[in-house]
Amino acid sequence: AEPGPAATAGASPRAAYRHPTELRATLEEPGLLAEAARQKEQGNEMLANGLLDAATQCYLTALWFLRRGSPTYPKALNLQVAPAGEAAASLLGGGRVSPDQPTLGRLSRLIVLLRGGGGGGSGGRGGGDGLDGEAAEALRVALHLNVAAVALRREDWYLAAAACRWVTERQPANAKALYRLGVAQEG
């Protein structure tokens, strides 16, 4: 005999889902790093299946998990369509574009983002407000490269260039970042 609806009700994927803010509240630094890695792997699966918006959201959510403290979950990641252009670029690296800076031009805003949001930076390491350590930094770099790869497939040249510039600021000889930056600039 097959189990009835009551027996399988708790086994649905929806029942196991927890919003990232809810999940984050229960995690310490090692758990945040693990969840960011899980989001990256989920993004890789989405990308392999051609689900570009879902992959972008996974990668950007993973970057959010790598931030220090209790950052506000970006409203742009609650939408069914992934953010693009400047809205998505504001979620990269330190990603802290201050709301009192609405008149910044695109280039100035990109410079602020690349410097870790203008908050003093960290000597080019760790994104300024993110989790520390080599594992977090390596994951952060990989996520930016993945964001760039997806952005190129979405023809979001602005986001691809911003993600690559974040990487090349930390690793000037990173071949993937340099190549993808060149493709984005040609787009």
Image: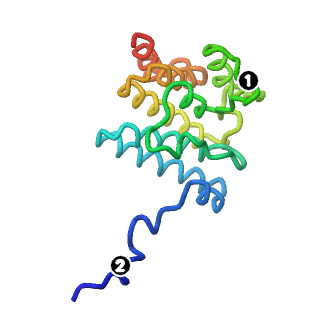
Against 35, residue 135 (above or below) is above
Against 4, residue 186 (above or below) is above
Residue under label 1, please give it: 101
Q: Nearer the viewer, residue 102 or 45?
A: 102
Q: Nearer the viewer, residue 121 or 106?
A: 106
The quarter of the picture where residue 22 lies is: bottom right
Image quarter in which the N terminus is found: bottom left
Q: Nearer the viewer, residue 111 or 76?
A: 76
Q: Secondary structure at mark 2?
A: helix
Instruction: Provide residue 177's location: percent of width, then percent of height.
Output: 47, 22
Check the image and tell me how it is coloured. rainbow
Instruction: Provide residue 36's location: percent of width, then percent of height.
Output: 53, 48
Residue under label 2, please give it: 8
The single residue placed furthest to the top in the displayed view is 186
- Image point (40%, 10%), residue name: 186
Against 108, residue 1 (above or below) is below
- Image point (37%, 28%), residue name: 154
Q: Secondary structure at mark 1?
A: loop
Instruction: Provide residue 107's location: percent of width, then percent of height.
Output: 62, 13
The disc labelled 2 sits on which kind of residue?
Thr
Against 82, residue 111 (above or below) is above
The quarter of the picture where residue 100 lies is: top right
The disc labelled 1 sits on which kind of residue?
Gln
Q: Give me the disc on residue 143.
A: none
Q: Nearer the viewer, residue 97 or 144?
A: 97
Report how far apart the C-alphas of labels 2 and 1 lie in the structure.
51 Å
In-image side of 87 versus 132 (left or right): left
- Image point (65%, 20%), residue name: 109
The quarter of the picture where residue 152 lies is: top left
Question: Given this view, does label 2 or label 1 mark the residue nearer the observer?
Answer: 1
